[in-house]
Image (cartoon, grey):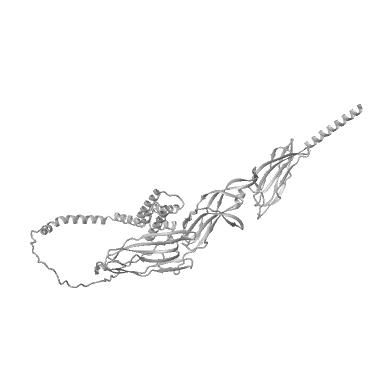
Amino acid sequence: MKLLKSNILLFLGMFLLVGVHSHAQDETEGVEFTMNLSKEELGVNERLRVDFTMNKDGDNFKPPQFEGFNVVMGPSQSISSSWINGKRSFSKTYTYILVPTARGSFTINQATIEIEGQTYKTTPQKVEVTAAVDKPNSQKTVDDVADENLHLVAEVSKGNPYMNEAVTVIYKLYVSPNVSVTNYRPLDNPTYNNFWSQDIPVTKHTAQNGTYQGKPYRYVVLKRVVLYPQKSGQLNIEPLSLEIFVDVPTNRRDFFGGRIYTSTSKTVSAGSRTINVKPLPEAGKPAGFSGAVGDFDFSVTTSKTQLNASESLQAKVEVSGKGNLKLFQLPEPELPSSLEVYDPEYEESINTYSSGMEGKVSNNYTIVPSFRGKYPIPSISFSFFNPGTGKYETISSEEINIEVVEGPTASSGTLAGPSSNKQVVVPTGDQFHFININPNLSAITSERFFGSNLFFILLFAPLVLIPIAIFTFKKREAIASDVVGNKIKRANRLARKYLSTAKKELGNKEAFYVALEKGLHNYLKAKLHIETSEFSKDKITSILSEKNVNNSDIQGFISLLTSCEMARYSPFSNVQMQQDYEKASEIISNLDKQL
């Protein structure tokens, strides 16, 4: 019995000793510290994932230098621990995401860590970086996903237009179904130098289905603009830049299994576009061509063709159609000198579509005849360049005859007035009358002139009239000798003439600045005899400098043109418009004194 008891105690002691030894051996042996690469060969545009994994927890982890790579993410740490059939399983990993800096062969050197007082090292591994691949399959960050799924594109309707031919630029944002755009804001709006530009408002941002590089996308039209190139040659269209706020899906899910999204913002740009603008051909250019480019109709009409003297009629010179309606001058009719003609009243009805401007412009002349007769209004010609046919076209109006049936007859002296457009007036109606056979004569009573009221009036009239005549003569002489003052008055009248339309549009920002810009251009064209095609800021500065115009006036003129361009993209108050109008009047007055 004692022997049995001693054998049992010996067996239990040996079992406990083996268990303790086995546990100590598990704790001290089997430590693993390894480096795992997602791939040993990758393209220069791919990413490399590096995992440093250990089966026991440690301290003082030191990663390698990663020569030839940039760390874009990491270290991220993950720990896994579990008990299976009474056996503990543990794993701890440090993860890095790397991008190569160049092609070639690189070595990921060893990393170190201390586990239970001992230092462990990984084995270095070589990585081969090759040329870029078409479909990189490395793990992407949120920004990478946003970059791949957002594209801002500028679609240009014509890459090789004629000068002053409409070019439409449509900015579309393509968005992949994988992401969701929440908002956007413009960072840099293009200024469209060397173009006359007109924005087409986008009232609704409606998503539409489309394709981008052969893949299904949704796209939204963000901006439309119509451009009219003002010079020939290679012209750059500046890029539009936007900041896009986007939600990108992650691999995580919420409590209910829904995908968790991460918000980020990305800057996208449409890129710079270049178009080759063809000059208008010189061959066949009509003498009266004023820069009209498009497809137009032309007409000259009058409100009536028969009227009495001192009554008025309206003569309308109108151009309608599709083209650069705001960028040329209407032809002027040549009217007989015996007709009183007032300054024309300009009217326009223009809509801007994606294909360009459409509508009509006209000058309305008020005409008042003074004498009886027939007055012909000669035929007027209007020339334009049609980019559809690549040729110049000329339309001539029909001659219109105005008949004044009642009124005084013009004398020969009146008809011989110094006018280049003088027309002979042909009297109509009864020119000879019967002699009155019932004169109804009465006796004439003679009165003495000496001592009469008329005698004393004529006697003392010179005493009153001579001082008045002397004063009037000196006043007119003083006015005539004031050369500077007269020039200022003429300049002020000239400024009011060219800015009359702009003054009527005060308070209406877009119409005001379009009229102001047109008035400034028309003044220079009339004063310097230059064509619309020459209107660029550099050209204007050069011409005015050659004319010895003060630099401050040149800069003021250029700043006004800049304000007219910026007014399409920025809010302008009524006070600012009034200041710009007064400044334009002052600049034109100053220029007219110097030119």
Give left or right: position of 10 versus 555: right
- Residue 64 makes an appearance in the image: no
Residue 227 on image: x %, y %: 48, 58
Quick one: quadrant of the N terminus? top right
Image point (89%, 28%), residue name: 6
Residues 180 and 239: in front is: 180
Residues 421 and 426: in front is: 426
Answer above or below: position of 550 versus 448: above
- Residue 300 makes an appearance in the image: yes
Image point (14%, 71%), residue name: 438
Quick one: quadrant of the C terminus? bottom left
Q: Quadrant of residue 14?
A: top right
Numbered disc total: 0
Answer above or below: position of 216 versus 80: below
Q: Quadrant of residue 307?
A: bottom left
Give left or right: position of 478 versus 182: left
Residue 299 on image: x %, y %: 39, 66
Residue 303 on image: x %, y %: 34, 65
Residue 158 on image: x %, y %: 52, 61
Residues 560 and 123: in front is: 560
